[in-house]
Amino acid sequence: MNAKERIQELKSKINKANYEYYVSDNPSISDFEYDMMMAELIRLEEENPEYKTLDSPTLRVGGVALDKFRKVVHEKEMKSLSDLFSYEEVFSYLEGIEKITGKEEYSMELKIDGLAVSLKYEKGYLKEASTRGDGLVGEDITLNAKTINSVPLRLKEDIDVSVRGEIYLKKENFEKINEERKAQGEELFKNARNAAAGTIRQLDPKVVRKRGLDTFIYYLVDPEKYNIQTQSEALSFLKKLGFHVNPESKVVKNKKELIEYIEDIDQKRFSYSYDIDGVVMKYNYMKDYDKIGETAKYPKWATAYKFAPLEVKTKIRDIAFQVGRTGVITPVAILDPVNISGSTVSRATLNNEDYIISKDIRLNDTVYLRKAAEIIPEVVKVIKEERDESSLPFQMIKNCPKCGSPLIRREGEADWYCTNNLCDARRIEQLVHFAARDAYDIVGLGDKIVEFLYNEGFIHDISDIFNLKDYAEVLLTKEGFKERKVTSLIDSIEISKKNNLDRLLYGLGIKNVGKKVAKIICEKYRSIDEIMSLKEEDLSLISDIGDIIAKNVIDYFKDIKNIEEINKLKSSGLNMIYVSSKSEKESLFSGKTFVLTGTLKNYSREEAQKIIEDKGGKASSSVSSKTDYVLYGESAGSKLEKAKELNITLLTEEEFEEMIKE
Ligand SMILES: [Zn+2]
């Protein structure tokens, strides 16, 4: 087979794989095979540029960045849809159409919360992609659209066609982007639609490619050219051409079916991997569109029913105050229970005194509550019209609700603190923090058990945890403490004593000393004795440690109670030495940087990372020329591609296991 034939073969295989993966959601080859074919195609096209065609999938990797977007005048105005918010409005809309056409058949579709895009194809090739803009003039985003895998570069038929649809980001990609932005200290995107809009307007297509946008196409311009009579036929036609068409659309033939569809989708709205904010109903028979007509802004033959926003009304019955391990006091609204996005909510955070005062939230107020997925419910607004005349402005408490100590608010901080180190509420939270997985990782010592052991007087300080074995007999007499539970708890406490020093330092709960800071300090000062004898200036020498952290650490170890506590931990046999992965020159992976990608069969990502670190290596999240190994599993993606480009040693899981066996 010559280069030209091979290029042709690779192209059609990759295009087929793309289609299966992104459009029909039914992949037949592994990501690895895909990556290999793509790498080969890139190489062959570089060697034989004369064979590179306009539908080559290598075009998707993104070309040169632009300085600005060209304006595009839409051939046919891109109108938006009118919104309906109640069933009454829906019924009156349907009756209006029925009066004109005598029919009530609709194509029902999801209203994807993304941004509209127009795609123009000539003889089957993607010619131009543009944003909606103001409906008349949009922006040319062709280069960016090419990086989106579900946008066909070449259709399955060599026809001229213009289509419209929605560009959106899957929720998981949105979360990933925000995680990365958070790590970089950049401002977070408010929601997936914002992130998609921000992404499509990136001037660098490579950035767009990385973000992983997707599309659903739902509108065919000039359907009569293709002899299409109904919207539902148009969707099938779009699908046949190779576009990503949302599978949830359905034809309904009467009002009852239409409302059932709305209710069904409303139930499922949070289960989709992308955001939707309603459903769209499109009158199915296109020949009647002219009769039904349009307004200046909207077509009348289609409309959107918007789901109720994620805010519900409820009443604040009480304001409680939670005490955290650092002593921070968090006001919490106790509410009349309400159902919001599928769960019952009876508490909502009020954040801090300033937040309450800025919104003038008061006891017995009627408020709007908001809850987004995985976000703590929050009071967003007070309905002041429904407030009782006798209501009084909120007053922050002056004493700790648990121990009664006076609270203090430091200058420049929004939070009030209980500074009593012996406060029960604080101590329980501290013990919970110590035993937590990312700190001292004592399996079986969760918050409920800690609270029980504390209240029963078994543990008061961290050091008491390590004496718990002396009370095993007594524990067995307590309800819910069966022999197996007690034994395994005692065992995991014993095992934990071998933990590395950074876990202990983090577990102590020194203010502002997080996991990373603890590790940085331990890397520099390798034993607890060394750390305890530090001076502020020693710590400030470490580049990642600021003055405030340094002062907190020094103050902590100046406190005689803390010194005594450390001495008790020492005599209980806890490891007080830091074993650095970096210093062991003789260890297997010392100085080597690993990147993990894909899913491993026998290890979770954290487990593999731990093995690498235990053997002196470092795990990094991105591939660069400094990477030594890329350990890849099932469904490895772009990192693998990059590693190959950079000629980095690739390890399968089996090869990795071989290495660590030696
Ligand atoms: Zn207190």
Image (cartoon, rainbow, N blue to C red):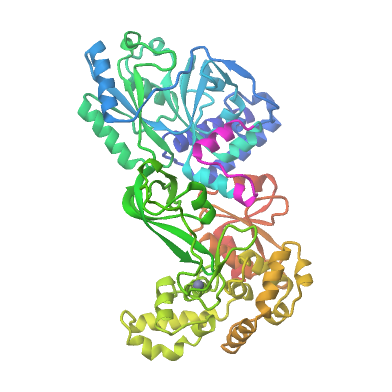
Q: Residue 539: x and y, percent?
A: 75, 70
Choose top left, top right, bottom left or bottom right for residue 537: bottom right
Question: Of 577 and 540, which appears nearest the observer?
Answer: 540
Residue 370 is left or right of residue 257, and the answer is right
**In the depicted structure, whether residue 371 falls above or below residue 251:** below
**In the depicted structure, whether residue 109 falls above or below residue 510:** above
Question: Of 247 and 15, which appears nearest the observer?
Answer: 247
Please check the rendered image and state whether residue 185 is part of the magenta-colored stretch, yes or no: yes
Q: Residue 545: x and y, percent?
A: 72, 64
Q: Residue 510: x and y, percent?
A: 61, 71
Question: Of 241 and 533, which appears nearest the observer?
Answer: 533
Question: Of 48 and 572, which appears nearest the observer?
Answer: 572
Q: Residue 396: x and y, percent?
A: 49, 60
Q: Residue furthest front?
A: 390
Q: Is residue 166 visible?
A: yes
Residue depicted at x 67% and y 78%: 557
Please check the rendered image and state whether residue 393 is part of the magenta-colored stretch, yes or no: no
* The magenta segment: 181-202
Quarter of the picture holding the N terminus: top right
Q: Is residue 579 visible?
A: no
**In the depicted structure, whether residue 50 falls above or below residue 342:** above
Choose top left, top right, bottom left or bottom right for residue 291: top left
**In the depicted structure, whether residue 447 falls above or below residue 528:** above
Residue 89 is left or right of residue 453, and the answer is left
Residue depicted at x 59% and y 72%: 503
